[in-house]
Every structure is written in C-alpha cells, then in structure tokens.
Amino acid sequence: MASTVQPLSSTVRIVEWDDLPARVREIPAGFNPLDEGVLMAHQREVVKLQRSIVAVPKGRRTGITFAVMLRKTLVAAASKVAGGDNVYYIGDTREKGLEAIGYVAKFAQIIARAQGSVSDIEEFLFEDQDPETGKTKHITAYRIRFASGFQVCALSSRPANIRGLQGHVVIDEAAFHPDVQGVLDAATALLIWGGQITVISSHNGKNNPFAQFCRDIEAGRYGDDAAVYTVTFDDAVANGLYERVCWMKGEEATAEGKKKWYAKIRNGYGVRKAAMREELDAIPRDGSGVRLPGVWVDRAMVLPETLVVRLALNDDFVKKDMEERKSWVDDWIKRELDPVLATLDPSVRHVFSQDYARHRDFSCWGGHALTLGLRRQCRVVIEMHKVPFAQQKQITHYAIRRLPNRCGGAMDATGSGEALAEVTADEFGHEHVHQVKLNRAWYSTWMPKFLQGFEDGMLDLPKDANMAQDLTAIEDVEGVPMVSKLRRDDLKDPELQRHGDSAVMLALGWFATLNLHAPIGYIAVPTHPRGFDNMQAGDMREDLDFPLIEHEGW
C-alpha cells in the first residue's frame, strides 16, 4: 500500500463544519454527488480524462475544482486493486485548501456509506523536508482518511518536496503560485513513480509558466499521455451554471433572471475587457512584459509627427546668463512651438500633462484635445532634454496659457517634478492642476484605464517612433501595469536614453481628461492701433468689454 503522510505528534485537530468556507457550508443538506446530472457537461468531461497530465485552463467559478475533488474522493475511497491511491491538493491559499477538503468531506458522507468508514477532517502539521537543503518546515494541512487506507490531503502552501507526494496531485490556481515554474517542474517529476497530475487555473498572462505549460502540452511536448481541456464561463453557462447557482441558493431560475445575472457578471469588469476575457473566457492577457500590443499603438498613431517638438540642450547652457537663456528660449518658442500651437482647434476642450525630468531622461509635456465622443487627441508634444528648471517653466507655462478651452491638467509631482508641479499649481490654480504622485496605487487605478483607451481605439497620437518606443516600456510589475525603470546603460546617444517618458505623460493626460474643471479660454492679444503703447493699464481695462483675469493670453 502506498505510504501516507504522518502528522507530528499531538498536533492533530478536528476541523468543525463551521470552520469551512461559506461555499462548502452552503451545499444543500440533500445533496448527493452520485445522483445523475449532478455534474454539468464540462465537469463530466474533465473528470473523464485519464491522462497522466491534465491541464485545465478555466474561467472563474466554473465548478472545475468541485468536480475534480469529487473524482479524487472516489480515488481515495477505492481499494488499491480498484485503482485507489492517495490524493494531494495544493492550492495557492489556505482558504482554497479548506474549500477543497470541505468538498471531499461532503462527498464522503455519501461515498463512505457504500465503501466503508471515513474520518473527520483533521488539521495537522505536515513535515516537509527540502531535498536540496535538508531543511525542514511544517505546513498546515487538512486530511480525510478512508477505510481503504488512502487519504485526501490538502496543503495550505507549496511543499518543497513535491516529489515525495506519490499518488494523485491536484494543483489549483497554478498560475498564481509564487513559484509557478517550480511547482510544475516538481509535479511532473512525480510521474516517475506513477500517479496523475491535474493542473487547474485561471490564466495570469501569456508569459506565465502555466500558459506556456498548456501550449507545450498542445504542441505534443509531453507526449500522448497529456491533455488540455479549456472551460470558459460561457461553456459553464451553456451547461446550466445559472440553474445550478439558483438550485444551490434555493431560488427559482428564470430566463429573465439568467439574462440579468449574466450581464451583471460581464458588466462587473467595467472597462477592464482584457481582464474579463482572461478571467471568464480563459484568454490570457499579454501578462508580464509589454502590455500594449504593437497593433494598438500603430492604430492610434494617425496624427502628423510634426506635432512633436524637441529641445535638447548641452551641459553649458545652464551656465549662461538668465536673460540670455530666456531670450534664446523665447526665440525657440517662436520658431518651433508657436506653429504647432497655432494648429489647436479653438472649438474643443483641452487638457495638459507632464512627466518631469531634468538630466538623463526626457521631460515630456503634452496638450490633449477632448473631441466628439470623448476621443482623446494628443495635439502637441514638447520633449525637453537637459533643459533647466527655469526654462521648462518658461516653455510649459507659455504653452498652457495658449490651450483653447483649457479644462485642467496633471503633472508628475514625484521627486524632482514636485517643484514645477507646485509652481504651476500656484500660477494656474491648485484645483486646476493635479499634482500626481506616481506610485503603485496610482498606476493600479489609472494605467488600466489608459490602456483600455488603446483597446477601444479612443486615442489619436502623433506618428513618432520615440513615443512608440516609450509605450513598450509599460509592463506588468506584479500584476500592476507600470513604466519599467530599466534602462540600457550602453547607449551613448541621449536621444536613445529614454525611460517611457512620453508614456507617462500620455497616461497623465488620460487622467486629466477624466478629472476636468471648468474651461478657461485663451484669446490672442489683438493688433493695436498706433499710440496704444502709451495707454495706461487702467485705460486698457476700461476699453475692453471682458475682464482680463478670465483671459490668460494677455
């Protein structure tokens, strides 16, 4: 008979029914897992697979763990000659382990009547020795022992010595384990001694080892004794998931109720369509690595590249006299920036945004038009390299004043960017200028909305190669889309020393369009008649039919 896991002495505790997760406790008292029709069609197909390796990419709450643990309960309850064996369940959380063992306890109430006695749920410390280091740790585990001599054991975390778990192994939500590849490598090594591996998971990105594991099986790299069976949320709905939910809750299933229930689940993802497809339709996102497909970026780049103006200065510029610096930049503004600002449509609203940098990176400022259908168009981009603080203020404040129907802006107020963001807020109003701390919390809230804009085709950008390069710097960092901080140190050309600068500027621009203020208009200074220069400021106010304070073009 196969070996069993021995608990440490004096550490066994009986788990009470009330300690189990609600999903287990809510199973109706009259539930019989052996009744005809208990399992839906997709559940039956999964448990029928008798391959040594079974991978099940799935939509959430499709009942796969429920079905697999029913099958594994029958395995543990059977005698050795009938194919019985030990079963080990490895979830990504303690809660998952309790849920799985709770299912087994519920199934065993029926199965044990026909196949002998069964123990209560026992909580104990599983002794796990790392075969490489020899170190031992204790893992909280739950088990049910059958008269067959076999058991179902649920571990609360991944053991180092998976290879020691001979029998049937179920790895649940594999894509979310801390060491996904380590789990898969160790599990497949179990097959040396026989048994079966079932790997169940929702997807967690295309580059996750679980997704690669599924692709390798489908490509035949594990031979004929491995299979992938994909179950989507729509598969489960077609097979009666809604009706099963109603039955579990004691509610009546109706066609109208099903329509509302389905829409509620889909609509719950809001604009996160990629997340919805991954979690419900088992279609993995790009995952770790570049978050923006190149085709989305190419589709967005429809505006002239001439809308991007660049000012790159040398290290000696800051040593010049302040008046000389100001005069030089005024001339640059007239030659390079004014022609682009002149193209702005005075009939639409505009916002601005800036990702600040002073030395190595580019400081990027953008003016964005909010057109019909809430379409965002990046109509002017100013990139500044090694431009002193005073001249960045000179350039950006000039551009801000000339945005028609300006409805606010957002500026990077992280680190060295805080000073410029603060003086800009002082100049144009602290309610008008959002000073944004670029941290993980901000990225997790706003970067997905920005990315969704690309997916929905709601952005128009200049056809600029540097901007396209910057957008590829948006990567998944532990599940949060952020701009990668990695740079290539071997590049000497400052034009190539980029840090996703315009990507951050564009994301801040999207944020600004969702946090609008009342528009402030810009009216150009009119051409004055001879002798106007001798007028006093008070006389000028009397001659005008609008207050100067509302028009910042003066």
Image (cartoon, rainbow, N blue to C red):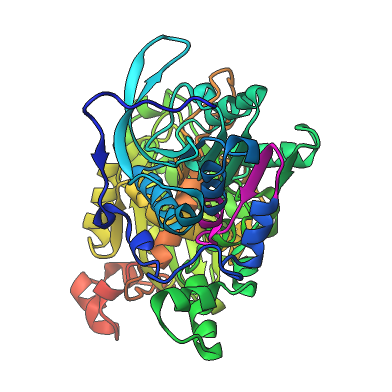
In terms of depth relative to the viewer, which is nearer, 419 or 373? 373
Q: Is residue 24 visible?
A: yes
Quarter placement of the C terminus = bottom left
In the image, residue 305 sits, relative to residue 360, either above or below, namely below
Residue at 33% across, 38% down: 389
Q: Position of residue 529 (x, y in %)?
A: 40, 75
Q: Which residues are magenta?
A: 49-69
Is residue 390 found left or right of 264 in the rendered image?
Answer: left
Is residue 50 found left or right of 103 in the rendered image?
Answer: right
In the image, residue 342 sits, relative to residue 251, either above or below, namely above
**Number of marks in picture:** 0
Where is residue 79, by image quadrant? Answer: top right
Q: Is residue 475 visible?
A: no
Q: Is residue 442 magenta?
A: no
Q: Is residue 58 magenta?
A: yes
Where is residue 344, by image quadrant? Answer: bottom right
Q: Position of residue 183 (x, y in %)?
A: 53, 30
Q: Position of residue 124 (x, y in %)?
A: 30, 33
Residue at 42% across, 35% down: 387
Q: Position of residue 66 (x, y in %)?
A: 50, 56
Is residue 428 found left or right of 394 in the rendered image?
Answer: left
Residue at 53% across, 19% down: 489
In terms of depth relative to the viewer, which is nearer, 259 or 469? 259
In the image, residue 174 sits, relative to residue 426, either above or below, namely above
In terms of depth relative to the viewer, which is nearer, 308 or 46? 46
Quarter placement of the N terminus = top right
